[in-house]
Amino acid sequence: MKESTKNSEWRHRLHEVIYEADTKAGKVFDILLFFLIILSVILVMLESVKEIDQNHHGLLLTLEWIVTIFFTFEYIARIITVKKPFKYIFSFYGIIDFLSTIPLYISYILAGSQVLLAVRAFRLLRIFRILKLVKFIGEASQLKEALKASRAKIAVFIYVVLILSVIMGTMMYLIEDDEAGFTSIPRSIYWTIVTLTTVGYGDIAPQTNLGQLFATIIMIMGYGIIAVPTGIVTVEYSKYGSKGKRKKTENLIHTNTQVCETCTAEGHRDNAKHCYNCGDELL
């Protein structure tokens, strides 16, 4: 019985350190984790530079192994400190944590797979919980609500743009010849999208007067098209800036970093005693 209680106690203490940022040890762990993630991403980028990799390959590999071993122990610790490990393993962060750990191991089987370690950049999303950036969380919540409210309008807008791109691309294929680069309708549609979005790579360009006139019209349309989705989201965002909706959004913002030991659910209310997902007590 005593052994079982001790077992439960050390798991709870380890859970608080790894999953939560309310304690001093938890904050230190999260900040260390944050810097190690950044270091790992930098190492992957440096390894992609041939000159640096040739001169410092041994050092980079050693540092990468140190980070990988740390993340391996962290991943195992996250699994053993929750009551339902599969909830964490198949969660968004669980999958990201797993993908950030295995590439260096499998690089000895599949050459070059260590570059997948760049997926660790996704773990930087934990910065919101680590540093408790309430203001940024609030703004992010409002932006998310604005995007959700405007998604139908944006979807219709994109659908219309795609139809226009197909029509105008087909017309350019008929106007221009192969020498100008318009060798097929898909390639002409590609040119239309590049021109319409004002990217303008310049790899394909109309040569005839009619084609250049048509291209000019598409370019002018492009400026209007770019402004439309921005305007849609801005209008919805301003609605959530009003007192009523802002208050509703602020009710969703909490600084509580407690993570349920059973189902690993996050985002509990500040004074929550029980998990909103599974109902277990928050210790």
Image (cartoon, rainbow, N blue to C red):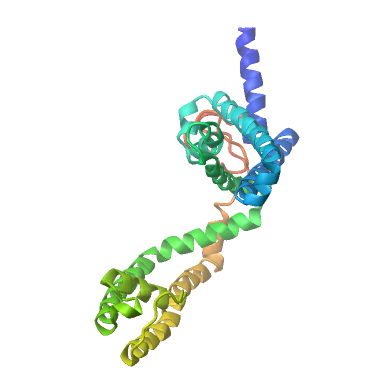
Percent x, y for residue 26?
A: 70, 35
Residue 142 lies, with reference to residue 202, above or below; the image says above
Quarter of the image for residue 258 reads top right
Residue under the point 39% across and 81% down: 205
Residue under the point 54% across and 52% down: 252
Percent x, y for residue 262?
A: 52, 28
| Image quadrant where one finds the C terminus | top right
Percent x, y for residue 197?
A: 43, 75
Residue under the point 62% across and 27% down: 73
Instruction: Tell whether 196 sits left or right of 188.
Output: right
| Image quadrant where one finds the N terminus | top right
Residue 169 lies, with reference to residue 254, above or below; the image says below
Residue 134 lies, with reference to residue 204, above or below; the image says above
Viewer-proximal residue, 277 or 36?
36
Viewer-proximal residue, 116 or 283?
116
Residue 281 lies, with reference to residue 41, above or below; the image says above
